[in-house]
Amino acid sequence: MALFNFSLDCSEAAEHLKKNPRHRTYLQGVPLEQLEKLYHILRDHLLGKCLEQSLAAVTLDPEEDLNKLDEHELTKKKQLMDQLFQKNQKKKGDPDFVYDLQVDFPEQDRIESCSWDDDDQSEKF
């Protein structure tokens, strides 16, 4: 299967590949997001980037400061977060759906001290 259109947006190129009549039978079970990631990795490889850099661009790092990203990168990260949310969302029709689920968190994880949140300073006002 030859891959072309690396000048296009990865999502457009993946969509063209999936809709191609020659490849439709092979790719109908492959999610479009997976093809987009593949195109992104292949395009970055052609540009000389290593695999780690390519994967970092298409995955979420919980420690990454999203305030430092430009608009285009921020939009891509938000789309990834939205896809992850949709994938993990429990809906009424799901077999493991529980209405009004309540969870008790351990007490040690709830208390987090911060220097700006000291009680001593609030008493002065």
Image (spheres, grey):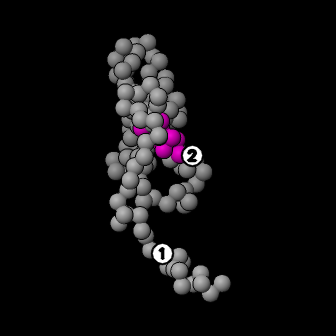
Of 93 and 22, which appears nearest the observer?
93
Say if the magenta span includes residue 93. Answer: no
Q: Which residues are magenta?
A: 78-88
Amino acid, disc 2: Thr
Q: From what the image shows, is residue 91 above or below residue 117?
A: above
Of 87 and 8, which appears nearest the observer?
87
**Is disc 1 placed on a helix, strand or loop?**
loop
Residue 49 showing in the rendered view = no
Observer-side mark, 2 or 1, equals 1
Q: CA distance from mark 2 to mark 1?
A: 31 Å
Q: From what the image shows, is residue 112 above or below residue 36?
A: below
* Disc 1: CA contacts within 10 A as few (<14), some (14-19) or many (>=20): few
Q: Which residue is mark 2?
A: 75
Q: Is residue 116 left or right of residue 96?
A: right
Q: Residue at x 60, y 51 (%)?
A: 71
Q: Residue at x 40, y 49 (%)?
A: 103
Q: Is residue 16 left or right of residue 38?
A: right
Q: Quadrant of the C terminus?
A: bottom right
Q: Can you tell which mark lies on residue 114?
A: 1
Q: Residue at x 49, y 25 (%)?
A: 15
Residue 51 showing in the rendered view = yes
List x then y, in percent, for residue 53: 38, 51
Dot 2 or dot 1: first in sequence order is 2
Q: Quadrant of residue 43?
A: top left
Amino acid, disc 1: Cys
Would you say the magenta stretch is mainly helix, strand or loop? helix
Q: Quadrant of residue 94?
A: top left
Q: Quadrant of the N terminus?
A: top left
* Disc 2: CA contacts within 10 A as few (<14), some (14-19) or many (>=20): few
